[in-house]
Image (tube, rainbow, N blue to C red):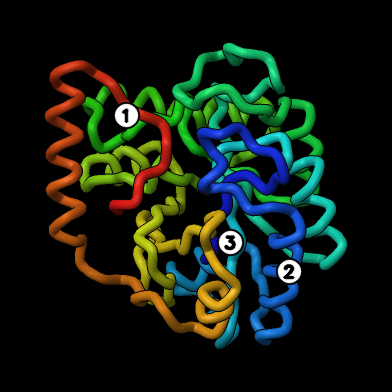
Amino acid sequence: MFLYHSVSADPPSWIAPFTVCPRVFAEQLDLLADSGLEVVPLRRLIAALRGGPPLPARSAVLTFDDGFADFHSTVAPLLAARGLPATLYVTTGALGGPSWPPEHGSLLPPAPMLTWRQVRELDQFVEIGGHTRTHPQLDALRRQAVQEEVRGCKARLEDALGHRVDAFAYPHGYSSRTVRRVVDEAGWTSAAAVRYGFSSGADEPLRIARLMVRTDTCRDRFLAWAQGAGAPVAPFPERVGTKAWRGYRRLRAGIDHRHPSLPTPVR
């Protein structure tokens, strides 16, 4: 399961380390095909995780976080040309286009974002999922604040799209048992983390492992991932460093309530 953010040749500096240029992105899509991987919709993975039909032996899922405007202008045409499905997790409070601040508030720094009109257009071709209202570090928030982020995002998306929305992704990939319980209670049927590993038929539906594709993801590393090598296979225990990092962030949140919005390397 691959995770992308922006696909752009000229991204804002804050998201640049997590951006893939369009030429490289197109090459990566072709590498998946050349490697014999079948790109399947997220719903097929979720069905398999919940006891349904198994996935093809060599399959992949494409996901995109946040809701950058380049998904409409660049990503969607490249996917459509190859007939590939994908899931787009949007931060509802960040939507609205290039204006700043966004309509409903967001912790993400300024960047060209999708408009609601574009999201409704994309809903005809890709799966739209939720990525909270403002993109906080959910595992550092109080339970009530987590509920507002998780439930508010779902309600806003379902109101805008006119149908049920089931797929969720944790900002930064961060979650905890409490956060996952809130996500489950809110009615989301799946939730994507990061974890820097391969998902599998035994993975956790509310903590699905993903591999983040970044600017510095070289061709050889991506090819290794496409061939099923170079990363652990979920499920696997939460790393000690991840627990320690969560404790530190919770301490900082209790002191100054700051929740930086840039992705970080510890999951």
Q: Quadrant of residue 204 in the image?
A: bottom left
| Residue 3 showing in the rendered view | no
Q: Residue furthest right?
A: 81
- Which amino acid type is marked by label 1? Val
Q: Is residue 263 left or right of residue 250?
A: right
Q: Quadrant of residue 203 in the image?
A: bottom left
Residue 233: x and y, percent? 36, 76
Mark 3 = which residue? Answer: 42
Residue shown at the point (32%, 45%) measured from the top left: 174
Of the residues tagged 3 and 2, which is closer to the observer?
A: 2
Q: Is residue 252 left or right of residue 38?
A: left
Q: Toward the viewer: 190 or 23? A: 23
The span from disc 3 to disc 2 (Cα, nearest Å) is 22 Å
Residue 139: x and y, percent? 25, 37
Label 1: which secondary element? helix
The span from disc 1 to disc 3 (Cα, nearest Å) is 24 Å
Q: Quadrant of residue 238 in the image?
A: bottom left
Residue shown at the point (23%, 46%) measured from the top left: 176
Q: Toward the viewer: 57 or 31? A: 31
Disc sitting over residue 186 in the figure: none
Mark 2 = which residue? Answer: 27
Contact, CB < 8 Å: mark 3 with mark 2?
A: no
Mark 1 = which residue? Answer: 146
